[in-house]
Amino acid sequence: MKENKGKKVAICWSGGKDSCLALYRVIKENYEVICLLSMVSEKDARNHAHGIQLEILKLQAYALGLPLILVDSAGEYELSLKRSLSHLKEKFGVEAIVFGSLYSKEDRKWNEQVAYKSGIEPLFPVWISQTDSSKLLNDFISQGFHSVVCRASTKYFDQTWAGRTLDWSFYDEIHQTDSCVMGELGEYHTFVLDGPIFHKKVEITKSDVVFNSGLWSLDIQTCHLLDKT
């Protein structure tokens, strides 16, 4: 849309499908994406959202061709995020922060409050009704994104789900579980490797499935980038 052209935004970045689809949509709507913003633990060298190693997250951002800003929460998650958003507004003229929230009203309310307190606008380009979850997963796969499950709750899944590709087989089988098909309530999380907005492909070269705190996790240890043909 023409009215969005040049409007500067940052993306609240997990590395997963929801934030990636949100990024894709704001690019198509002519927003100017200044950076990806990810909340992390520098002590653990991983991001909070999905436990991805920071070096792997940086490689993903490079594949997308976008700057990545890592924000160490150091036990003060909300305060750290507000400070970062205020800084982005003052230094780079960022006008809005893009969130990958789907239909959790509680999640959206918290994100809105943090954004407004920081003096910028919250945007929710993938906000849907709960009944539209299947359509959104269909859209994600149909657009040509390649993603893997990096966390799967033991409440819904066994260890074979960790590392699975989000393809049409996944689409069919997730509908046979009690999980939200998009994992909106934390049933599963993903890491995106490729898609229409990627300049290079991310290929996982070494990983292990580990169990921790009720989750089967794909611990991605090393990756490399491949040229796209």
Image (spheres, rainbow, N blue to C red):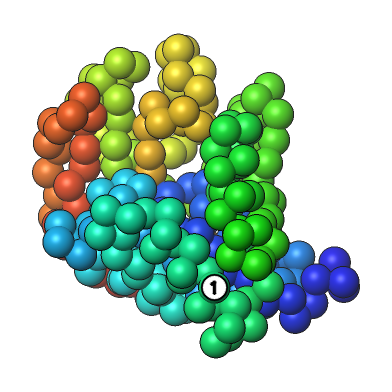
Vertical placement of residue 55 versus 169, above or below = below
Question: Mark 1 Cα within 10 Å, few/some/many (few <14, many 20+)?
Answer: some
Measured as percent of width and height from the top left, residue 7 is found at: 74, 76
Task: Give, as a three-letter code, the residue at label 1.
Answer: Ser
Residue 98 shows up from this direction: no
Vertical placement of residue 21 versus 86, above or below = above
Nearer to the camera, 20 or 71: 71
Nearer to the camera, 187 or 94: 94
- Residue found 31% across the figure and 59% down from its top: 73
SS of the residue at dot 1?
helix
Residue topped by disc 1: 86
Measured as percent of width and height from the top left, residue 216 is found at: 21, 31
Say whether residue 52 is left or right of residue 210: right
Measured as percent of width and height from the top left, residue 59 is found at: 31, 71
- Residue found 62% across the figure and 27% down from its top: 134
Measured as percent of width and height from the top left, residue 220 is found at: 19, 52
- Residue found 12% across the figure and 36% down from its top: 210
Instruction: Name the residue at the right extreme.
Output: 2
